[in-house]
Image (tube, grey):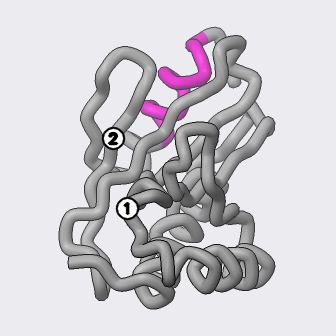
């Protein structure tokens, strides 16, 4: 990305796109409103050496899902992940259900960042349709 750190460069791209965000250390947080989710909190961060950018939506912990619905949810998430454009539906090491768009392209353009965010936000509505939460 430039002489700026990766997260600083991403922040600059968001500013150029007029996307509002807050920053806590190396995490950028944006709020979106979709058809199903009125206060969607999406985070952008990097790995330790800043060679990867992650756009993440934490959904809920898998253990919070009724045990009788977990297998169907996991299956539906796998199907949705196959169909999603550049977004992974995943369960992380802490059993948190997350949506993730990631890239190791450290020369991102504003349009590429906008596309990644757009795909992730759209996938959030897809996840809500699979497993509605209030």
Where is residue 75? Give x, y as percent: 70, 81
Span of residues in magenta? 4-13
Residue designated by label 2: 29
The number of callouts visible is 2
Q: Residue at x 56, y 59 (%)?
A: 99
Q: Is residue 37 left or right of residue 83?
A: left
**Which is more foreground, mark 1 or mark 2?**
1
Q: Residue at x 58, y 14 (%)?
A: 5
Mark pair 1, 2: CA separation = 24 Å
Quadrant in which residue 73 is drawn: bottom right
Q: Decide if residue 111 is in sight here.
A: no
Q: Is residue 14 magenta?
A: no
Which element type, helix, strand or loop, lies under badge 1?
A: helix
Q: Decide if residue 134 is in sight here.
A: yes
Proximity of marks 1 and 2: CB atoms separated by less than 8 Å: no
Q: Nearer the viewer, residue 66 or 106?
A: 66
Q: Is residue 5 left or right of residue 129?
A: right
For the N terminus, the image quarter is top right
Main SS of residues in magenta:
helix
Number of residues whose C-alpha sits closer than 10 Å to that of mark 2, classed few (under 14), some (14–19) or many (20 or more) = some
Q: Nearer the viewer, residue 108 or 27?
A: 27
Quadrant in which residue 6 is drawn: top right
Q: Nearer the viewer, residue 107 or 92?
A: 92
Say which mark, if any, is on residue 64.
1
Q: Is residue 9 magenta?
A: yes
């Amino acid at each position: 990305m430039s002489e700026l750190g990766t997260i600083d460069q991403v922040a600059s791209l968001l500013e150029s796109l007029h996307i509002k965000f807050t920053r806590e250390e190396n995490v950028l947080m944006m709020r979106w409103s979709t058809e199903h989710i009125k206060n969607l909190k999406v985070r952008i961060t990097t790995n330790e050496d800043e060679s990867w950018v992650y756009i993440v939506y934490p959904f809920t912990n898998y253990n919070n899902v009724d045990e009788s619905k977990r297998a169907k949810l996991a299956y539906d998430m796998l199907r949705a992940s196959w169909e999603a454009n550049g977004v992974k539906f995943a369960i992380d090491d802490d059993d948190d259900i997350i949506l993730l768009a990631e890239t190791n392209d450290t020369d991102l353009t504003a349009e590429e960042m906008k596309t990644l965010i757009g795909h992730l936000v759209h996938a959030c509505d897809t996840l809500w349709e699979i497993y509605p939460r209030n």
